[in-house]
Image: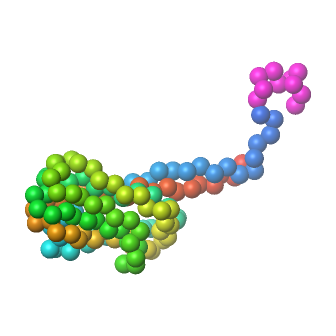
């Protein structure tokens, strides 16, 4: 297509494939953050691989004594990220931690484990943000 036939400068060719990313949020609702419980919340992934990026917590009330640590693992392996909920924060306070581009595949389990010295009977809503890459083939 010549410039005379294409005065708007529209593309004259397109790539054979195009990659698009899709944001995904995995929600763990009402995780008990009293460290004595050793609470473990689990999500079994089904489908295409996704890349985990961030762990966030929002606590339901203040932690009066000690902190709570929410640690993410895949299939019970080593830590891939941990968010610390500190003493003195209020309801709705958000604590986040980056997860260094870890991929979870079909059938693997994402686990959140609570530890720390908190003694308050509070809960946290936890989310893990992820990205799924989609490849589109053009004809």
Residue at 77% of width from left, 34% of height from top? 11
Left/right of residue 85 with respect to residue 134 in the rendered view = left
Number of numbered discs on residues? 0
> In the picture, which quadrant includes the N terminus?
top right
Residue at 87% of width from left, 25% of height from top? 3
Q: Which quarter of the picture shows residue 25?
A: bottom left
Q: Which residues are magenta?
A: 1-10
The vertical placement of 70 against 94, above or below, is below
Residue at 43% of width from left, 61% of height from top? 99
Q: Which quarter of the picture shows residue 87?
A: bottom left
- Residue 8 is a magenta residue: yes
Q: Main secondary structure of the magenta part?
A: loop
Q: Nearer the viewer, residue 14 or 81?
A: 81
The vertical placement of 101 against 92, above or below, is below
The vertical placement of 74 against 2, above or below, is below
Residue 37: x and y in percent read 16, 73
Residue 29: x and y in percent read 25, 58
Q: Nearer the viewer, residue 100 or 51?
A: 100
Left/right of residue 63 with respect to residue 24 in the rendered view = left
Regarding residue 27, the answer to whether it shows in the image is no
Residue at 50% of width from left, 67% of height from top? 103
């Amino acid at each position: 297509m010549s410039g005379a036939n294409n005065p708007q400068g529209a593309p004259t060719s397109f790539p054979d494939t195009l990659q698009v990313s899709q944001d995904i949020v995995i929600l763990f609702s009402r995780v008990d953050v009293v460290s004595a419980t050793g609470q473990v919340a689990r999500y079994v992934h089904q489908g295409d691989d996704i890349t985990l990026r961030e762990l966030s917590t929002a606590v339901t009330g203040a932690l009066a004594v000690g902190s709570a640590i929410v640690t993410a693992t895949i299939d019970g392996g080593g830590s891939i990220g941990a968010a610390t909920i500190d003493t003195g924060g209020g309801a709705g306070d958000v604590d986040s931690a980056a997860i260094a581009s870890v991929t979870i595949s079909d059938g693997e389990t994402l686990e959140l484990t609570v530890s720390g010295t908190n003694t308050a009977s509070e809960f946290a809503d936890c989310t893990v943000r992820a990205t799924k890459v989609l490849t589109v083939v053009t004809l």
